[in-house]
Amino acid sequence: MTYDDLPSHRHRTHLILGITPGGKTFRPGDWAERLAGVITLFVKEKRPGRNLASTWLAVPFVDDGVKCLTVSDELAEICPEAFEFVMRFAADNGLPVEEGARMLRAG
């Protein structure tokens, strides 16, 4: 068995792309960082002691000039309200969400 085979280290993700339905860059430019911060606040309120939650539950990054946010399915288990909030944010703003990518986390 390898590290990759351990179920506790496998999480499905939702990739939110910062592109509007019209193909333009979603604004404000720091939307992904703001959402990651909101997720951290939700998790801290519901699960004190999870101070580093955002390091694996929501990860902002830029891919080919497009701001993105990956959200782990683990967030739905730890704090369903935060998961609903971020998915609703994406839907309300017409941001595309790609589901099913796998991400690993240490620990």
Image (tube, grey):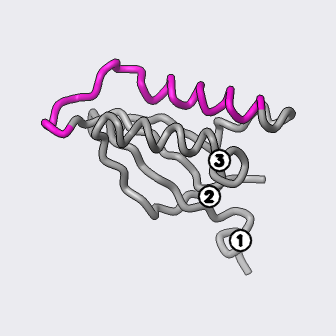
Q: CA distance from mark 2 to mark 1?
A: 10 Å
Residue in the picture at 15% in, 37% down: 23
Residue 88: % across, % down: 44, 41
Name the residue tied to disc 3.
80
Which secondary structure, mark 2?
strand
Query: Compared with residue 41, is residue 105 higher up or lower down, i.e. above or below?
Result: below
The residue lying toward the viewer, choosing from 81 and 68, is 81
Indicate left or right for 18 with 99 as reference.
left
Q: Residue 58 occupies which quadrant of the picture?
A: top right
Indicate left or right for 24 with 9 as reference.
left
Query: Compared with residue 92, is residue 98 higher up or lower down, i.e. above or below?
Result: below
Q: Which mark is residue 66?
A: none
Name the residue tied to disc 1.
7
Q: CA distance from mark 1 to mark 3?
A: 20 Å
Q: Quadrant of the N terminus?
A: bottom right
Q: Which mark is residue 104?
A: 2
